[in-house]
Image (tube, grey):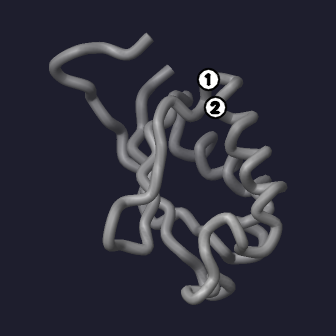
Amino acid sequence: MKLFAVIRTRGKAWQPSVPLASQTDWDAHAAFMNNLHKEGFILFGGPLEDSPDVLLIIRAGTPDEVAQRFASDPWSSQDLLRISRISPWTLRPGSLP
């Protein structure tokens, strides 16, 4: 397994005037993301301040696997979030569990 830095950004359906946890299907999205974390697919993640982006550190075999897994996110199909970048990431110094 490799590490990937993934940037997801807000899509056309995102409502800027609505808080994160009040966006359409928040509960389904949160459950989806929490499940990916429990599986060890998502190691870390969160919104980047003062931007429409989210940074995720992912453990996967290939970039295609990353894209396929996020295709099942309710927010992907509704265009609330979309992947803007998937980059292999080498962690230095330190290590992750």
Residue 27 higher or lower than 79, as above or below: above
Q: Nearer the viewer, residue 85 or 25?
A: 25
Residue 6 in the figure: left or right of residue 32:
left
- Secondary structure of the residue carrying numbered label 2: helix
Residue 42 in the figure: left or right of residue 78:
left
The crowd level at tag 2 (other Cα within 10 Å; few <14, some 14-19, many 20+) is some
Q: Residue at x 22, y 15 (%)?
A: 94
- Secondary structure of the residue carrying numbered label 1: loop
Residue 78 higher or lower than 6, as above or below: below
Residue 1 higher or lower than 61, as above or below: above
Q: Residue at x 78, y 69 (%)?
A: 77
Mark identifier at residue 37: 2
Figure quadrant of residue 7: bottom left
Residue 37 in the figure: left or right of residue 46:
right
> Do the residues bearing badges 2 and 1 touch, measured as CB atoms within 8 Å?
yes
Mark identifier at residue 30: none
Q: Quadrant of the C terminus?
A: top left
The crowd level at tag 1 (other Cα within 10 Å; few <14, some 14-19, many 20+) is some
Q: Residue furthest left?
A: 93
Figure quadrant of residue 69: top right
Q: Looking at numbered disc 1 in the image, what kind of residue is underneath it?
A: Gly
Residue 74 x %, y %:
80, 62
Residue 10 x %, y %:
54, 75
Q: Residue at x 79, y 53 (%)?
A: 72
Residue 84 higher or lower than 35, as above or below: below
Q: Looking at numbered disc 2 in the image, what kind of residue is underneath it?
A: His
Q: Which residue is mark 1?
A: 40
Compute the Cα span from label 2 to label 1: 5 Å
Residue 47 x %, y %:
44, 58
Q: Nearer the viewer, residue 25 or 92?
A: 25
Residue 4 x %, y %:
42, 38
